[in-house]
Image (cartoon, rainbow, N blue to C red):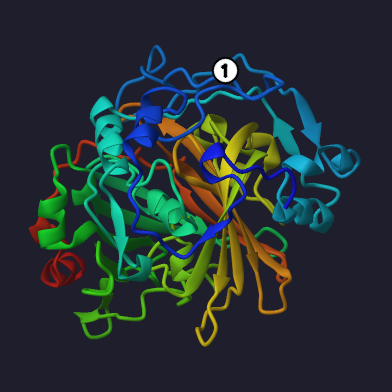
Amino acid sequence: MKKITLLSLAIGLAFSGFSQAKVDEQQVKKLSGELTPMGAVRAGNADGSIPEWTGGITSAPEGYQPGMHHLDPYPQDKIKFTINQANLEQYKQFLTPGQIKMFETYPDTFKMNVYPTHRSASYPEHVYQETIKNAGRSELIQDGNGITQAAVGVPFPIPQTGLEAIWNHILRYRGEALTREGGQVTPTASGDYTYIGFDEQLMLPYGVKGASPEELEKTNILFKFKQKVTEPSKLVGTALLVHETMDQIKTPRQAWIYNKGIRRAQKAPTVAYDAPGTAADGLRTTDDFDMFNGAPNRYTWTLKGKQELYIPYNDYRLHSDKVTYDEIVQAGHINQDLVRYEKHRVWVVEANLKENTRHIYKKRVFYIDEDSWQIAITDIYDDRNELYRIGMAHGLNYYEVPTQWSTLDVFYDFQSKRYIAIGLDNENKMYDFSAKLKDVQFTSRALQRDNR
């Protein structure tokens, strides 16, 4: 691991496991001073290539209306330089092993266009305030497989362990509810693909303004997610419902799949861990969705520190409704002329598979954006300790909320030289963050009714 430095709060230590120690009052005060409310270093870096955080995007660009694909707030930015196979050595210190492997695997086509860095991540004021409260009260329970005394904001803005950092990703603010259309592709090695469309609904009780830790612990629900396949016709009728819990030992994830053959919704306890993702052609696991989700109990988590990296960021061009899927999807990897990379500071968290525990991934290294707690990149290793896959999240600010989130997640498989791109919505309606969803819409009976 290159150029990893530990923050002053963790000098000399690589934390692992979990801790029930709360952050003291002096540390909490830093969230209104040298740190942002989300726990990022407010100042820029030494050479100025990462600027100071000044609040992120606080208003939409002129001409934007809710319901539109999000306009690029930085249309005048030019490419600073391009990393390719020829000059790779010059920039390796700011790349992950998985990114370097992409250049080795696709030496003639893979490149990274690097733009000026904008720390665009922003959230509503009440999310900042709840995050500051969480810092002094949130705790992990059940060996880190549950959380208590947390609501709305990230629970551990000043993380002391790898588990705390990964829970920040899982619980990062994404609004209160949303509906979205979109889909995924799993191109062949030659670039041929079939678009698989989804209609999804997400209800996030954890993020509701005014939610209290006590209320959340009573229901034990973090979020509810419903997905149905809308195309191609041979897959229409496939549907999934998930209830994610706060204490996953007390009540593990609850999931149901609608079986169109028998026209019933059935309990699906295997929708977790390394079970294959929906229509993913074996190119992602269930816990790859959203870069990582679900119970973390099969891994030992270590907080390695921070690193400056070139990561996908402010990918408004890739997100644009002026771009077609055919322009994005190419053989080997997505069209890199549409991808924007910037230098940002990331938390580095290493997950190693526990002994006597099963998963197809032996090790995963997560690189988490310090401003948003969105996993930007994950390097994935097989049981031979060789790079197996890399996942990249192409983030941007959905400024009507506001929230920093991915517009497209892509997992590249080095063995098959194929990939899966999840979240394609350029030719669909944009997310609706104003959706009013109810619990009654997220029952197995509703799943069955919706898909008959």
Q: Amino acid at mark 1?
A: Pro
- Crowding around mark 1 (Cα neighbors within 10 Å: few <14, some 14 to 19, many 20+) is few
Q: Give 137 or 128, whichever is nearer the viewer.
A: 137
| Side of 235 where 205 appears, left or right | left
Residue 69: tell me if it is visible: no
| Side of 128 where 19 appears, left or right | right
| Side of 302 where 134 appears, left or right | left
- Identify the image quadrant of residue 70: top left
Q: Is residue 386 above or below residue 118?
A: below
> Which residue shows up at 29% across the image and 41% down it?
153
> Which residue shows up at 55% across the image and 60% down it?
302
Q: Give 142 or 201, whichever is nearer the viewer.
A: 142
Q: Give 29 or 293, whichever is nearer the viewer.
A: 29
Quarter of the image that includes the C terminus: bottom left
- Identify the image quadrant of residue 418: bottom right
> Which residue shows up at 69% across the image and 19% down it?
78
Q: Quick one: SS at disc 1?
A: loop
Q: Position of residue 285 (x, y in %)?
A: 49, 70
The residue labelled by disc 1 is 75
> Which residue shows up at 40% across the image and 11% down it?
62
